[in-house]
C-alpha cells in the first residue's frame, strides 16, 4: 500500500477540500496521512477514513510561524515513511520538495490558490518577492501539479513551464430537490455567506447593504481575522438585528444551514489575481443546495454562468448594488425560479464524484514513476 502524506497549514477540522481528497485517496487503497497544525481553539479531530496529525506550535502567525512550521514539517517528513508527499500551496512546498529529493520520493504540488497573489502578500513587495523566488526555483522542477481552475492552470503553466491538471474544489452530490414556491417570498429573506471572515471577501459591503434592506437577514457562517470588526460594524450601522453570526459550523452540518438560505454570497474584492482567478468551493455548495448566489463577474464564474444560469454577477462591489440585487431576486419569481432550476442542472455536473475520477487518474500516473 503506497503512503501519501498531504501537508497544509490549517487545523484540518474545517478543510472540506482536503477531507474529500484524502478520503478519496484512502478509499482507493492508498495509506493517507493529512498533516496540519493545532491552534488554541482547535476542536478534537473527527474520525476520518485517513490518518491525521497536527503540530502544536509556539508561533501561529507571521514569519516565525512559517519558519517554525516549515522546520517542524521538514524534520517530520525526514523521518516519516512515504512514497508521495502532496504539498498544498507554497507555504508547505519547501520542506516537502527538499525531503522528497533527499529520499528520492515524489513531490506533488497542489496549488489551492495563487499564493503570491493573495491579499496578505500582494501589498507587501518584499514578502511577495520571497514567495515568488521560492515558486520559480521549485515548481518548474516538479512533474506532477494540479490546481482548482482552468484559468489558474493556464497562468501557472505560463509562469512555471510545467503542466497543471485541473481538479475542481466541489462538493459531493446532494440528493433531493427543493420546491421554488415553498421558499420564495418567505420573510426573512436569508442571505448566507459561508467561509472565513477575512479581508477581501466583501463582508463589510454585505453588512452595509443591510442598511437598505427590510425583511432580510444576513447570516455569516464562519469566523476569522475580521470577526470582531464585523460585529462592531453591524452594531455601528444599527443592523445587528439583521446580521446573524453563526460561528464555525462543522462541514457535516453546514449543508443543512445552507439549504435554509435563499441567496448565497461569494463576493471577492479584486485585490490580486488569486481572487480574480478564483473558483471558490462555496459557489458550488450553493449550487448543490439549489440556491442562487451573488458572485463577482470574474472569469471562472462568467464561464460557468454561460453554461448554467446559476449566479447573479456583479461588476463592482457596492452595498447599494448588493441590496438592489437582493430586492430584484425577492420580487422576480420567474428570475429566481430559473436560477434555481439552473442550479439543479449544474448540480449533476459539478460534483466531487466527477472530480474524484480526475484525482485518482492523476495519482495513477504518479504511480508510474514509482515503478
Image (spheres, rainbow, N blue to C red):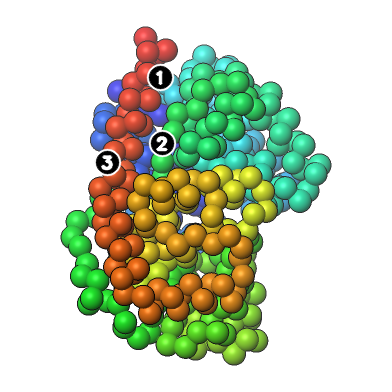
List the residue tagged with mark 2.
167
Q: Are marks 2 and 3 in contact (CB under 8 Å)?
A: no
Nearer to the camera, 21 or 278: 278
Cα separation, mark 2 vs mark 1, equals 15 Å
Question: Of residues 112 and 315, which is closer to you in this image?
Answer: 315
Could you classify mark 2 by the number of other residues whose Cα lies within 10 Å: few (under 14), some (14-19), or many (20 or more)?
many
Which residue is outermost to the left?
176
Q: Quadrant of the N terminus?
A: top left
Is tag 3's residue or tag 1's residue first in the polypeptide sequence?
3
**What secondary structure is found at the residue carrying circle 1?**
helix
Q: Position of residue 159 (x, y in %)?
A: 64, 27
Mark 2–mark 3 distance (CA, rounded to whole Å): 11 Å
Q: Earlier in the sequence, mark 2 or mark 1?
A: 2
| Mark before the other along the chain sequence, 2 or 3 | 2
Does the image show residue 254? no
Q: Position of residue 40 (x, y in %)?
A: 55, 61
Q: Residue furthest top?
A: 371
Identified at 48% across, 50% down, the residue is 302
**Which residue was labeled with disc 3?**
353
Q: Tell us which disc is closer to us: 3 or 1.
A: 3
Q: Residue 336 vs residue 195: left or right?
A: left
Assign the C terminus to one quadrant of the image. Answer: top left
Q: Is residue 130 visible?
A: yes
| Residue 336 quadrant | bottom left
- Residues under numbered marks 2 and 1 in contact, where contact means CB atoms less than 8 Å apart: no
Marks 3 and 1, how far apart at CA = 20 Å
Amino acid at each position: 500500500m503506497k503512503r501519501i502524506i498531504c501537508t497544509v497549514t490549517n487545523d484540518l477540522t474545517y478543510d472540506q477540500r482536503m477531507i474529500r481528497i484524502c478520503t478519496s485517496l484512502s478509499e482507493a487503497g492508498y495509506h493517507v496521512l493529512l498533516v496540519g497544525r493545532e491552534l488554541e481553539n482547535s476542536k478534537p479531530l473527527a474520525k476520518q477514513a485517513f490518518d491525521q496529525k497536527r503540530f502544536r506550535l509556539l508561533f501561529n502567525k507571521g514569519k516565525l510561524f512559517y519558519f517554525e512550521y516549515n522546520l517542524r514539517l521538514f524534520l517530520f517528513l525526514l523521518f516519516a515513511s512515504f512514497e508521495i508527499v502532496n504539498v498544498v500551496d507554497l507555504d508547505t512546498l519547501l520542506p516537502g520538495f527538499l525531503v522528497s529529493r533527499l529520499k528520492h520520493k515524489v513531490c506533488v504540488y497542489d496549488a489551492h490558490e495563487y499564493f503570491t497573489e493573495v491579499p496578505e502578500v500582494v501589498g507587501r513587495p518584499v514578502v511577495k518577492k520571497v514567495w515568488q523566488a521560492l515558486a520559480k526555483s521549485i515548481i518548474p522542477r516538479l512533474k506532477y501539479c494540479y490546481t482548482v481552475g482552468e484559468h489558474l492552470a493556464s497562468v501557472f503553466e505560463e509562469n512555471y513551464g510545467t503542466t497543471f491538471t485541473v481538479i475542481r474544489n466541489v462538493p459531493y452530490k446532494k440528493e433531493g430537490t427543493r420546491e421554488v414556491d415553498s421558499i420564495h417570498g418567505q420573510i426573512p429573506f436569508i442571505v448566507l455567506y459561508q467561509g472565513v471572515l477575512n479581508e477581501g471577501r466583501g463582508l463589510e459591503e454585505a453588512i452595509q447593504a443591510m442598511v437598505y434592506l427590510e425583511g432580510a437577514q444576513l447570516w455569516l457562517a464562519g469566523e476569522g481575522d475580521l470577526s470582531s470588526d464585523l460585529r462592531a460594524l453591524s452594531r455601528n450601522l444599527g443592523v445587528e438585528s439583521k446580521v446573524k453570526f453563526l460561528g464555525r459550523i462543522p462541514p457535516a452540518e453546514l449543508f443543512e444551514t445552507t439549504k435554509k438560505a435563499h441567496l448565497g454570497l461569494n463576493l471577492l474584492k479584486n485585490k490580486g489575481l488569486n481572487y480574480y482567478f478564483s473558483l471558490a468551493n462555496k459557489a458550488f455548495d450553493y449550487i448543490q443546495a439549489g440556491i442562487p448566489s451573488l458572485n463577482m463577474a470574474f472569469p471562472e464564474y462568467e464561464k460557468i454562468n454561460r453554461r448554467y444560469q446559476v449566479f447573479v454577477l456583479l461588476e463592482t462591489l457596492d452595498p447599494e448594488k448588493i441590496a438592489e440585487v437582493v430586492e430584484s431576486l425577492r420580487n422576480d419569481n420567474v428570475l429566481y425560479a430559473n436560477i434555481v432550476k439552473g442550479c439543479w442542472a449544474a448540480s449533476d455536473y459539478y460534483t466531487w464524484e466527477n472530480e474524484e475520477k480526475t484525482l485518482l487518474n492523476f495519482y495513477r500516473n504518479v504511480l508510474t514513476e514509482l515503478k
